[in-house]
Amino acid sequence: MAFDAPDEQALAFREGMSRLGAAVTLLTSDGVSGRHGMTASAVVSVTDTPPTLIVCVNRKIRCHDLFVENGVLAVNVLAGRHQELTSRFGGRFQGDRFAGNNWIKLKTGAPVLEDAEVAFDCRIVDVRPVGSHSVMTCEVETVRLHALDAEGLIWFGRHFHHLHAGAPK
């Protein structure tokens, strides 16, 4: 597809990315800059030796600098039962985003949602600007799996979708 203007390219890119399903997560952090969190779907596995993730965060949002200053974050992978949290941790929510849920701390001290499907407790080891975002390389210190049957919350086609583990058909 050829583009006549940069705006057309950006629109086509966003439409294409809306068709790339992604797990919905909460990125949370605590430390010298306080406790903060945001909803994110830009999380990618890099390697299992050492366990490492990449997290992409817009540099214009407040959480970006606070995550970098704290140097730690947890990637809390959400289930369908957590869909309400996506709006609380996204956008312009006013109030305590952490209220009403059970949070624990693992090795780094970043808040971990007690019943997250999986939580990756990480140290940020590198931050590189790419366009409007930073690519944060995060070494995983601890992985915490939820004991219940696996369930996922996916963002696809600009809507949430609930997935349930089961035997493939």
Image (spheres, rainbow, N blue to C red):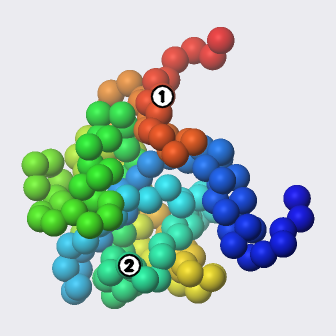
- In what element is the residue under mark 2? loop
Give residue 5's quadrant in the image.
bottom right
| x then y, percent, for residue 102 | 14, 48
- In what element is the residue under mark 1? strand
- Within 10 Å of disc 2 (Cα), the crowding (few <14, some 14-19, many 20+) is few
Question: Would residue 33 be found to the left or right of residue 11 on screen?
Answer: left
**Picture residue at 22% right of the left edge, 86% below the top:** 32
| x then y, percent, for residue 116 | 32, 44
Looking at the rendered structure, the kind of residue marked 2 is: Ile
Q: Which residue was labeled with disc 1? A: 163
Looking at the rendered structure, the kind of residue marked 1 is: Leu
**Picture residue at 40% right of the left edge, 48% below the top:** 77
In this rendering, the answer to whether 53 lies above or below 76 is below
In this rendering, the answer to whether 71 lies above or below 76 is below
**Picture residue at 88% right of the left edge, 59% below the top:** 1
| x then y, percent, for residue 136 | 52, 76
Residue 122 appears anywhere in the view: yes
**Picture residue at 29% right of the left edge, 34% below the top:** 81
- Considering every residue shown, the one lying at the far right of the view is 2
Question: Would residue 58 be found to the left or right of residue 44 on screen?
Answer: left
> Is 67 in front, or is 19?
19
Residue 145 appears anywhere in the view: no
Q: Quadrant of the C terminus?
A: top right
Asked if marks 1 and 2 touch (Cβ < 8 Å), the reply is: no
In this rendering, the answer to whether 82 lies above or below 141 is above
Q: Which residue was labeled with disc 2? A: 61
Cα separation, mark 1 vs mark 2, equals: 30 Å
Question: Would residue 47 be found to the left or right of residue 104 on screen?
Answer: right
> Is 146 in front, or is 98?
98
